[in-house]
Image: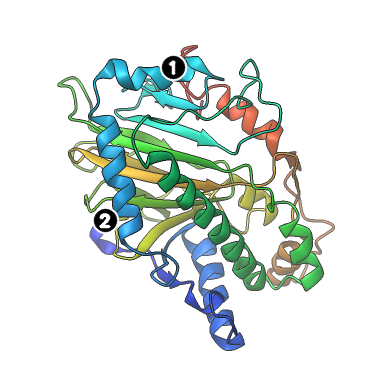
């Protein structure tokens, strides 16, 4: 099966941006989000009414300027100068599934009170000394934080949550412990196997990915019982025993690629599932993913609304006798993941 057989849905968030919302249009957007999360775990989000296209283009220009600096300049904001989470990582320093990734990047996290670089993720962000870099990216961060809350609200409607239930959920994400990455993909060494980043699932809440126009790079694994994915371009299939196929999630103008992470899988007790995805190397390119996450102290538990929906799908059972996902405190979950983020101890982010 090839990636030409399917594509991700495109969902317009504009109805939720109106000063006076049209309930019918908002419901249509929420239903589309719900269906996309059930079927794919991935979708394109049309944000043409939310951003100016020149904004991410400028971010890409600034990223290119940084990644073309001499190595010694980039190393000045290396991870080792802070908490081994915030800052620059060299080519192959990031690891997925025990294998070094063919990209370099800079990671930023939500600023914390009383930073302490001896504690994981509790240091200070390190910014390149490039005019306008910090200001432009901080503007993008603020917009993505707002977008995260908008999409969360729209998803709550798709799940048929009550107003009270939505406000309870909102209180778990209103101080999002967000993460932003700036990723550069330089020319590959001759001993590579074609991957920029191996197959993985995101472990947070919502990912908003802006990518340059490079095609056939991001691939998403669509679960389809009875379908056997074959090796693509001589690359490993990477999906274990799951049945389905890999499709391309090529950039779409005025859209970000959005996917749900493991926290949404817990919130919905498996109704929404975090989806495998990977990045193939298709030449030098740049990507800016923003991870809208729960609050650091959020206690993530299956939502009553999701349990009601699951029960309605199985009339013979009730939400009380279904096996539910175990609650997790997001900060604890994050620390376990980040503890194996980089090739500092021989392990990687998703080990």
Instruction: Please tell me how crowded label 2 is: few (under 14), some (14-19), or many (20+) other residues with Cα within 10 Å.
Output: some
Q: Quadrant of residue 111?
A: top right
Q: Which mark is residue 275?
A: none
Pick whichever, 16 or 226, lies toward us. Answer: 16
For the question of whether residue 228 can be seen, the reply is no
Residue 214 in the image, given as x and y percentages of width and height: 21, 49
- Kindly indicate the quadrant of the structure image that contains residue 22: bottom right
* Residue identified by numbered label 2: 3
Q: Is residue 23 above or below residue 145?
A: below
* Structural crowding at the residue carrying mark 1, measured as other residues with C-alpha within 10 Å and reported as few (<14), some (14–19) or many (≥20): some
Residue positioned most to the front: 131
On screen, residue 304 above or below 105 = below
Q: In terms of secondary structure, where does tag 2 sit? A: helix
Q: Could you say where residue 181 lies in the image, as x and y percent from the top left?
A: 43, 38
Q: Closer to us: mark 2 or mark 1?
A: 1
Estimate the x, y position of residue 156 in percent, counting from the top left: 66, 67
- Left/right placement of residue 301 relative to residue 82 reads right
Q: What residue sits 29% from the left and 57% below the top?
A: 251
Q: How many marks?
A: 2
Q: Position of residue 79 (x, y in %)?
A: 47, 20
Q: Earlier in the sequence, mark 2 or mark 1?
A: 2
| In the image: residue 27, left or right of residue 8 | right
Residue sitting at 26 percent across and 50 percent down?
212
252, above or below 341, in the image: below
The quadrant of the image that shows the N terminus is: bottom left
Residue 343 numbered tag: 1
The residue sitting at the left extreme is 190
């Amino acid at each position: 099966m090839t990636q030409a057989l399917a594509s991700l849905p495109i969902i317009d968030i504009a109805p939720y941006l109106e000063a006076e919302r049209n309930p019918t249009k908002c419901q249509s957007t929420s239903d589309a989000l719900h269906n996309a999360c059930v079927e794919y775990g991935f979708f394109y989000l049309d944000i043409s009414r939310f951003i100016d296209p020149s904004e991410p283009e400028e971010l890409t220009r600034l990223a290119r300027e940084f990644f073309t600096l001499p190595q010694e300049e980039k190393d000045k904001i290396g991870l080792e100068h802070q908490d081994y989470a915030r800052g620059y990582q060299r080519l192959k320093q990031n690891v997925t599934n025990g294998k070094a990734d063919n990209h370099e990047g800079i990671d930023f996290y939500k600023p914390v009170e009383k930073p302490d670089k001896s504690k994981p993720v509790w240091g200070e962000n390190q910014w390149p000394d490039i005019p306008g870099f910090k200001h432009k990216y901080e503007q993008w961060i603020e917009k993505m934080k707002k977008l995260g809350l908008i999409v969360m609200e729209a998803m709550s409607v798709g799940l048929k949550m009550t107003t009270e239930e939505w406000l309870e959920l909102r209180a778990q994400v209103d101080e999002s412990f967000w993460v932003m990455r700036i990723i550069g993909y330089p020319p590959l060494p001759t001993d590579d196997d074609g991957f920029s980043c191996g197959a993985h699932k995101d472990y947070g809440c919502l990912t908003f990915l802006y990518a340059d126009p490079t095609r056939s790079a991001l691939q998403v694994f669509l679960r389809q019982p009875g379908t056997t994915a074959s090796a693509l371009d001589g690359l490993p299939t990477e999906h274990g025993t799951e049945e389905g196929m890999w499709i391309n999630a090529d950039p779409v103008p005025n859209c970000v690629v959005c996917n749900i992470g493991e926290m949404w899988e817990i919130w919905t007790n498996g109704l929404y599932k975090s989806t495998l995805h990977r990045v193939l190397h298709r030449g030098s390119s740049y990507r800016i993913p923003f991870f809208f996450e729960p609050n650091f102290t959020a206690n993530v538990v299956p939502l009553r609304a999701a349990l009601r929906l699951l029960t309605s799908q199985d009339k013979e059972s009730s939400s009380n006798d279904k096996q539910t996902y175990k609650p997790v405190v997001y900060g604890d979950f994050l620390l376990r993941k980040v503890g194996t983020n980089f090739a500092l101890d021989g392990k990687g982010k998703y080990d």
